[in-house]
Image (tube, rainbow, N blue to C red):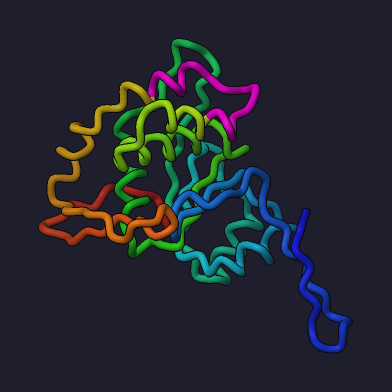
Amino acid sequence: MGLILEGEGGNDDVVWVPPSNFSIVEEGIFRSALPLPSNFAFLESLNLRSIIYLCPEPYPEENLEFLQSHNVRLFEFGIQGTKEPSETIPKDTITQALRVLIDVRNHPVLIHCKRGKHRTGCLVGCLRKLQNWCLSSVFEEYQHFAGAKSRDTDLRFIETFDIVYLQQCLYSIIYQYHGFGSNKRRLLYREENLHKPQLTSM
């Protein structure tokens, strides 16, 4: 499914096709699967400033070229998949990704992994805990995107992710909500001797 915009004269139609599993998380925060070249026109319409990529595989060259041509910064966090019960997502890596995610200087930002289900769902789930969502609502959102491939290991990770631990890691960040509608909530903060995480970026 895509949105077709007709240019002047009716001859220059532009088709905007969002990536698979695309959705708005919050104002200035989006999530999806790995964008394909057919999605680039849609991404351009978002005026992205950053992308958070959660897979260990190298970022596709054509995607890198798109980011470079549009001055979009890439933050890479190589998180392995968690198909086996013994596999877990590194807590420190998610914490670093959250620091990038709530930094409004990086907005508008797109979060994605390969399919926009598990790793992306875990990061968004931890964000929701930071936003004081009840756990049942966090799980419902995760399962909405993961569908039949929902993973108990991911749900356990989200449930046991220690927000107090995150707040200790972000001791230099003061954040607050503003607005009353869910579409206007946004994390704001100011820096006080902030130590920048070691990230791979463009």
Residue at x-position 40% and y-position 50%: 200
Q: Is residue 160 rendered to the left or right of residue 60? A: left
Q: Is residue 84 rendered to the left or right of residue 14? A: left
Residue at x-position 64% and y-position 51%: 35
The C terminus sits in image quarter: bottom left
Asked whether residue 75 is drawn in magenta, I would say no
Secondary structure character of the magenta stretch overall:
helix
Q: Is residue 161 above or below residue 198?
A: above
- The quarter of the picture where residue 122 lies is top left
Residue at x-position 16% and y-position 60%: 191
User: Where does the magenta region start and end?
Assistant: 143-157
Asked if residue 94 can be seen in this view, the reply is: no
Q: Is residue 131 rendered to the left or right of residue 40? A: left
Q: Position of residue 65 (x, y in %)?
A: 61, 63
Q: Position of residue 79 (x, y in %)?
A: 46, 33
Asked if residue 178 can be seen in this view, the reply is: yes
Q: Is residue 160 above or below residue 7?
A: above
Q: Is residue 194 rendered to the left or right of residue 10? A: left
Residue positioned most to the top? 86
Residue positioned most to the bottom? 9
Q: Position of residue 186 (x, y in %)?
A: 34, 57
